[in-house]
Amino acid sequence: MSKFLKSMIAGTALLALVPLSALPADAPPTQKPYVVLDKNLTQLRADFNANVGKVRMLYIVGPTCGICLRGMSDLQESVYAKKGDDPRLVTFVIHVPTLGAREANVVPASHLITNRHTTQYWEETGITGKLMQEVMGVNKYVWDFWTIYGPKAVWSDERLPPAPDFWQHQLDGLPIEKKLDANAFAAKIDGFLAQIPAAPIASTLGAAPTKSE
Amino acid sequence: MSKSLRMSKSLSSVVTGLVLLLMQVGSSSAHTPPTHQGPGAMNHDPAGGRAPVDDSYASEVPHEEIRDQNQATLAADKGEQSIPVAEEIDFVTGNSFRKPFEESLKTVAKVDYYGTRYVDCEQYPLEVHTARPNQVRLLMKTGKSFTFEGSKSNQGIEVRGTPQGLAIEQQRALFATFEFDTPILELEKNPHAFEPLGMEKLPGMLTWKLQADSSSGYRQVVYVDSHYGDIVKLSIMNAHGAHILDVAPHDYRAVDGIRVPFAIDYRSPDGPVLANDRFDRIEVKRRRS
């Protein structure tokens, strides 16, 4: 018994010395810097509702569409570079497969917005644009679409996202006065932010304080 | 027996401790810190465990929004900063802000620039005369007489004297790659005039990235402002592929119906500023109709 235990100890101790890299490869792969959505947008809906009480931006983009990328870049300059990591602002960027985009295109495009409270999603069927089309009541697939939801917005429908409180676009066939203007968009965000008390300074230093955590 | 039991208990607690240690090691490896701190990234498996199967790819996107694009047609170079994009040339040439300026440029025969070249604390009066097709003549004074004159014409490139701020090879490369027309007009004439390389973020702006090979052996990568269509940066490589100069035109203004830069900065490939040109007067001369 003693010998058995000794050999167990020795064996276990040896195992403990084995470098992590030599362990069986059953550890999960490195986490992706974006979220893959199912067709029901389950995670997006959960994330949206987990952040009630904050100003939420939801963008539908094609990750290989230059004009969409320019929109992201403009908002980085007008919104995120100026407001920093304000925890009262939460952003959801949904990449859809327009213009032949694939999942591999999400990461290069996602670098255009650098903000701790932004989540990038890949939605492979493209149903996000169809659902938003239904919400907006327009006769056009909706993408290159930029929305703001105020702090009270809740995604209560099982299928459809709520109608945005403010939106802009870069599409042909939608009102020209609603074309994306990053400065006007940023001013609108300020208006919504005014409805929420400023966060204590300490909370801006910690990790993203979402309700779901 | 009792000793053996104590021993056994003691040993098993050691074993338990080691097993727990191993579990912790395993546990820590299973919780690799996420690279992303956004609101949705910490609380679920990002792969969702059930990514859509291939036949659902783009199944909800109307055909006209797919436009038969595939990965092979995406424009991109191998640069880490480049973002692959679809239909780059169409978007570059379709810039609606630029259209009236481009149309106006078609009837321009000459553009003359008057200003100053700044090199460190020195400054030199400068004149640059450009004309169709792709002719350029640069005159720079350092005192009472001209000390540098360079030109590109049908007869080739001629250089007399030493350019201030730039090396002779760099100044020659500038002459060799000079184009009177903008990339948009060049692409209108020849859709293959530039190879699309995707997009790249420069400070404050996202640019279209295009590459052109000059008949003189130089290669240039042109960065075009994705809003205004202005060239905001040129990287010039020599025939051996060596990166020899970066040029950054800026302070674009409308003059007589065309967009022209009132400032040009020159940098060596490793970053230091070599010279700055500032123009206080630009004259546009049109073709006689």
Image: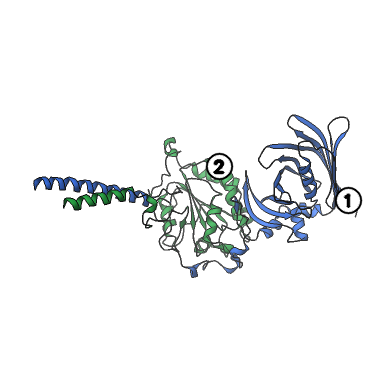
Chain colours: A green, B blue
Image quadrant occupied by the C terminus of chain B: bottom right
Q: Is residue B142 above or below residue B104?
A: above
| Mark 2 neighbour class, 10 Å CA radius: few under 14, some 14 to 19, many 20 or more | some
Toward the viewer: B273 or A42? Answer: B273
Q: Looking at the image, can residue B75 be seen?
A: yes
User: What's under tag 2, amino acid-wise?
Assistant: Ala
> Looking at the image, do the residues carrying marks 1 and 2 touch, with CB atoms under 8 Å apart?
no
Identity of the residue drawn at 15% across and 45% down: B7
User: Between tags 1 and 2, which lies in front?
Assistant: 1
Q: In the rendered view, does B156 fall on the left or right side of B223?
A: right
Q: Looking at the picture, how far across and down is residue A151, in whole percent? A: 45, 47
Q: Looking at the picture, how far across and down is residue A194, in whole percent? A: 49, 41
Alpha carbons under labels 1 and 2: distance apart: 50 Å
Q: Is residue B117 above or below residue B193?
A: above
Residue occupying the far bottom of the picture = B55
**Chain of the residue under label 1:** B
Q: In the rendered view, does A127 fall on the left or right side of A4?
A: right
**Chain of the residue under label 2:** A
Tally of marks: 2
Q: Looking at the picture, how far across and down is residue B168, in whole percent? A: 79, 41
The residue tagged 2 is A81
The numbered mark at residue B106 is: none
Q: Looking at the image, can residue B19 be seen?
A: no
Q: In the rendered view, does A56 fall on the left or right side of B197?
A: left
Element under label 2?
Answer: helix
The residue tagged 1 is B155
